Amino acid sequence: SDAQLDLVAATCPDVGTIDQHSVRLIQSHLERMLPASTFFSVFSVNLDKGCPFWQDDAQCVIRECSVCHCDDSEIPPAWLREPHKEKACRDGEACTKQDRLNDVDRSLTGLAALVGQPVWHTADSDAWTIRDEEDDKFFVDLRKNPEQYTGYSGPNARRIWEAVYDENCFTFSQKCRSGICDVDTCKEERVLYTLISGLHASISMHIAKRYLLGERWGVNTSIYRERLRDHPERIANLKLAFAVVLRAVSKASTSLHPDSYPYVTGNKENDDNTQKEVKKLLSFPILQPGCEDKVFDESDMFLEKNEYLLPEFRSGFRNLSMIMDCVGCEKCRLWGKLQFLGLGTALRILFEEETPNLERNELIALFNVFHKLSSSVIWVEKMEALLKRDSRVK
Ligand code: FAD
């Protein structure tokens, strides 16, 4: 309501500490808006690329790991007709498949498999995340494949997280690995670590909030306690990751506004509603000028060091996004790829283009990762209340 919005306007948050009320407003809006919108629910992705760093050691065979693809009838007909026409080139020219292949030095793939070690590519590309080639993508309805407990764990899952946190990923100094950053650690490095740890915390929260308890789905407070509550720095990282995406959304609000990007699927009623809801979201006071740069201030990042640090940061993040093709559970891979694309889009907005020419998939990923992170932040409070209740019952 308007009264609620006024309250948010009156309380501009401090850096990294957004008040719970603002998060709740954003989260409940996205929670309603995204599933109701065909545009934001149908994501195109290639889940069969294979791991470029090591030979797949395991594929999850648990039912919950599999992804349900869209029937053609569920895909906006216009999207079906031009699956290969999405703009994939930054310079706006028609893009060939070869252009995209050049994003990665594929010769490394064989080498990586041979030595069984991650080999990071340093191809000079301006992309924050690695692209799936249009020809190999298929459509997935995110509503039918919710992020939740899948049973994926053990050495394969651990190996992914290890690779993600491994110093090889971070071409900067390695002080942040333990999560305890000293004052000398540069802000750029801390932000990258925080984003990854925050995303990891969010994935753990989604596992905890929808867990298979025998025959039924329910909340698993022990997972929350062990993976988040016992590590307060992970909760702090989750909140900062949310703040980074919030800041990016507000910074790009002109590009995200339906006047700039029409969010078209061809179903007029659904598209009108998506546009109305996006407009409403972007009008929240916390996303308005004057408030949003208090949430996360990137203005002191990549200043004089810009020339070498930004490309290094970008290529580090792109390597991380490539690891997602090694995730041995299809559904986890889907959400991993989507959320890395969403974070990469946020970083592109923050550090490169305030008014970027965003592709459909980038928009879908950005709004969905915004939703996922906001839900996880909200669920910290809910989990705390559940734990309190449980301790009273005992
Ligand atoms: P893990 O979560 O595997 O963590 C490994 C180690 O990383 C921990 O021992 C700890 O030292 C460190 N760590 C943990 N959390 C953090 C943090 N926030 N910040 C810094 N360090 C941390 N499983 C599902 O059930 N559903 C999913 O949708 C799902 N999606 C996944 C997506 C990806 C990209 C990956 C790699 C895995 C996914 N998994 C998913 C698996 C899940 O993340 C865990 O790996 C699995 O549940 C086993 O958990 P664990 O307790 O062994 O610790």
Image: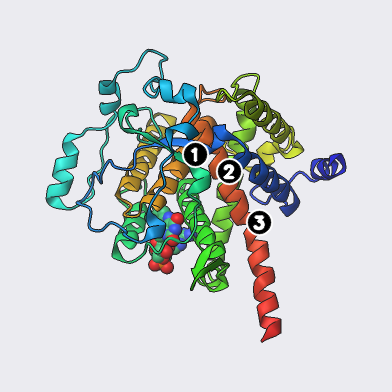
* SS assignment at label 2: helix
Q: For the residue carrying disc 1, how many other residues have a C-alpha within 10 Å: few (<14), some (14-19), or many (20+)?
A: many
Q: Is mark 3 within 8 Å of ligand 1?
A: no
Mark 2 or mark 1: whose residue is earlier in sequence: 1
- Identify residue for label 2: 370
184 lies above or below 262 = below
Q: Residue at x 39, y 19 (%)?
A: 85
Report ligand 1 position as a quadrant. Answer: bottom left
Mark 2 or mark 3: whose residue is earlier in sequence: 2
Measure the C-alpha gap from mark 2 to mark 1: 8 Å
Numbered label attached to residue 342: 1
Q: Residue at x 23, y 47 (%)?
A: 53
Measure the C-alpha gap from mark 2 to mark 3: 12 Å
* SS assignment at label 1: helix
Q: Are marks 2 and 1 in contact (CB under 8 Å)?
A: yes
Quarter of the image with the C terminus in it = bottom right
Work out whether residue 235 or residue 365 is closer to the camera in this orientation and state it.
365
* SS assignment at label 3: helix
355 relative position to 90: left or right: right
296 lies above or below 261 = below
Quarter of the image with the N terminus in it = top right
For the residue marked with disc 1, what is the amino acid? Answer: Gly
| Rendered image quadrant of residue 306 | top left
Q: Is residue 334 visible?
A: yes
- Identify residue for label 3: 378
Mark 1 or mark 3: whose residue is earlier in sequence: 1
For the residue marked with disc 2, what is the amino acid? Answer: Phe
Measure the C-alpha gap from mark 1 to mark 3: 19 Å
Q: Position of residue 64 (x, y in %)?
A: 41, 58
210 relative position to 1: left or right: left
